[in-house]
Amino acid sequence: MPGRPSPSRRTVLRGAALTPVAGLGLTACGAAGGTTAPATPTAPVELGKDGEVAKGQAQLYREHDVVVSRAENGSLKAYSTICTHAGCPIDRLQGTTLVCPCHGSQFDARTGKVLRSPATEPLHELPVESRNGKIVAGPRA
């Protein structure tokens, strides 16, 4: 086309490099957002040994979409790890901070509170107890 400059090699390569990355982001959000995982277990689930969660720490149980933390006094708290923003399963725990892979929301695993948006609602708290040396979360049986 006369009067229109052709793109440089750098412009073409940059565009080609960014296109697949943008597509992956949409795929990841679409796949996770498209699944409607329940926000809470529908029955009590045995998560692991009682000693797995140290005082002041948290443990992520990805296969059950639950995080459990233990306070300094030894009490347990559990939260659903289904993000309250778009329903994505949270799959990363950094110390006591949960990080959602879809849009970057962050939550405190000890309180369920939002630390970083876009989520605005805290995580759903679950009943949890130590039973026969195991951590059990979900509705009481």
Image (cartoon, helix red, strand yellow):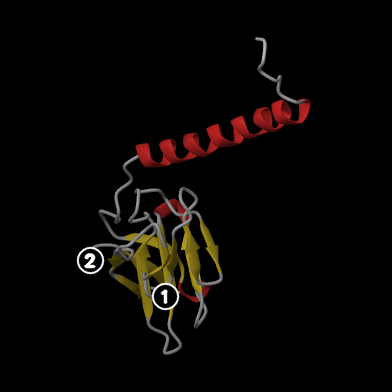
Residue linked to disc 1: 110
Q: Quadrant of residue 132?
A: bottom left
Q: Quadrant of residue 35?
A: top left
Image quarter of the C terminus? bottom left
Image quarter of the N terminus? top right
- Above-or-below relation of 53 to 117: below
Which three-letter amino acid code belongs to the residue tagged 1? Answer: Arg
- Above-or-below relation of 51 to 94: below
Residue linked to disc 2: 140
How far across and how far down the image is residue 105, in percent?
44, 58
Considering every residue shown, the one lying at the far right of the view is 9
Q: CA distance from mark 1 to mark 2?
A: 21 Å
- Give the structural element (helix, strand or loop) at label 1: loop
How far across and how far down the image is residue 81, in percent?
39, 58
Q: Quadrant of residue 2?
A: top right
Residue 131: in sight, yes or no? no
How far across and how far down the image is residue 131, in percent?
35, 73
Which three-letter amino acid code belongs to the residue tagged 2? Answer: Arg
Considering every residue shown, the one lying at the far front of the view is 3
Whichever of callouts 1 and 2 sits on the residue coming sooner in the sequence is: 1
